[in-house]
Image: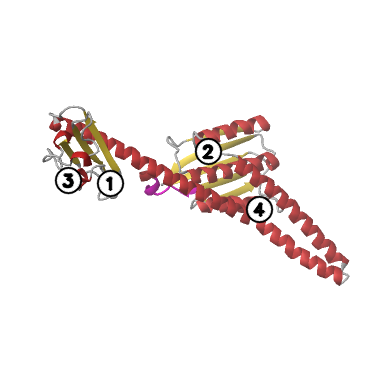
Amino acid sequence: MPTEPHETIISYELPCEGCEKLARGHKFYSAAISSCASGTDCHYAGHQFHSIIVAQLEDDISPKKPVGTLTLLFNDQNQHVDQTRKTVLSFARLISIIVERNKTNRDAMRAELMADRQAIANDIHDSLAQTLVYARMRTSLLLESIRNGNEVMSAKYANDIEEALEISQKNARELIKDFRCAMDPSGLPNALQNLTEQFGQRNKISLEYVNRVAHLELPLEYEIQVFHIVQEALANIAAHSEATHARLIVDFSNNYYIFTIEDNGSGGCAFTPVEGHYGMMIMRERAQRIGGEINVRSSEEIGTHVQLFFPAPGTNWRTANE
C-alpha cells in the first residue's frame, strides 16, 4: 500500500486494488509508488515510475457517478503536488466536458434519427397511404356498380381511381425527392439562400430573399419542416401564380418565427382541388409538427400570400446545445 496520500481523492478503476480502496470517494489522489507495500501486487511497482496522480472525471448531472479517471505516472518523486493539483484538476475538468459533450451529441443524433424515421412514417401515411385507402374504397364501389350494371357510376368510380393513382404516383415521387434532399450542413439560412438561387435559375420569376433574423438557428427537425414548407410554397408559385416577382421573408416577432412567401401574381395559387389539397394538407401537417400554423390568402388584388408561423423552440434544446 502507498504511504498516506498528499490529498484525498478518488480513483474510479485503478489497476491496484489497494490504491482503488484508498482513493475511492475523492477527487484527487497522489502517492509514491516506490513506497507501495503491496509489492508484486502493485501494477506499477518495480517499473521506472515512482509516483502517481489520479483525478476524477466528474459528471455534472450525476456527480456520484464519475465518467472515468485521469491517471498520471511520473518517473520521479513528485515534490510539487500542490502546484500540480490545480493543473491536473483543470485538465480533468476539460476532459469531463469533452466526454459529456460527446455523449450529448450521440444522444442528439439518436433522437434526430428517431425523429427522421417518424417523419418518414408520417409523410407516407399523410400523403400516400390515405390516397391508396381512398382508391381501394372506390374499387369496391366500382365492382359493385359493375355487378349492378350501372355504367354511369362505374365510369365515375373508375375516374376517381385513376385520379387517386395519379396523385399517389406524384406523392411517391415527392417523398423520394424530399428524403433524398439532405439539409444543408451549414444550416437553414444557407439552405434557403440556395433554394432562392435555384428558383431564380429555373423560373422567370424574380425572387427576393429577406432574412431579418440575425441568428437564425433552429433544431434540425424544425429546419427540415420549414425548408420543405417553403419549398412547396415556391413550387406552387412557379406552377400557378403567373407572377413576375415574389418574396421570401424571414422574421421574428413576439417570440414567434414568421416565414412569409408572397407574389404579385393572379391569385392562382389557392391550391387546386386535385394536387393542391394534398400539398396544403402536408404543409399544415409539417407546421403542426413544430407547433406552428399556416395561413393562405390568394386573390387577383394581392396575389398569393402564404405565411408559416411557430413559437420559438423551448429552452431545453438551446440549453443542450450551448
| Front label number (3 vs 4) | 3
Sequence-first disc among 2 and 3: 3
The residue that mark 4 highlights is 278
Amino acid under label 4? Tyr
Q: Residue at x 82, y 62 (%)?
A: 156
Q: Residue at x 42, y 36 (%)?
A: 215
Looking at the rendered image, the quarter that the C terminus falls into is: top left
| Front label number (2 vs 3) | 3
Taking the magenta stretch, the answer to whether it contains residue 310 is: yes
The residue that mark 2 highlights is 249
The residue that mark 3 highlights is 22
In-front residue for pair 220/102:
102
| Res. 6 image quadrant | top left
| Distance between mark 2 and mark 3 Cα atoms | 64 Å
Sequence-first disc among 3 and 4: 3
Relative vertical location of residue 77 with respect to residue 64 in this rendering, above or below: above
Sequence-first disc among 1 and 3: 3
- Indicate the position of residue 118 as horizontal and vertical percent values: 54, 53
Label 3: which secondary element: helix
Q: Is residue 176 left or right of residue 321?
A: right
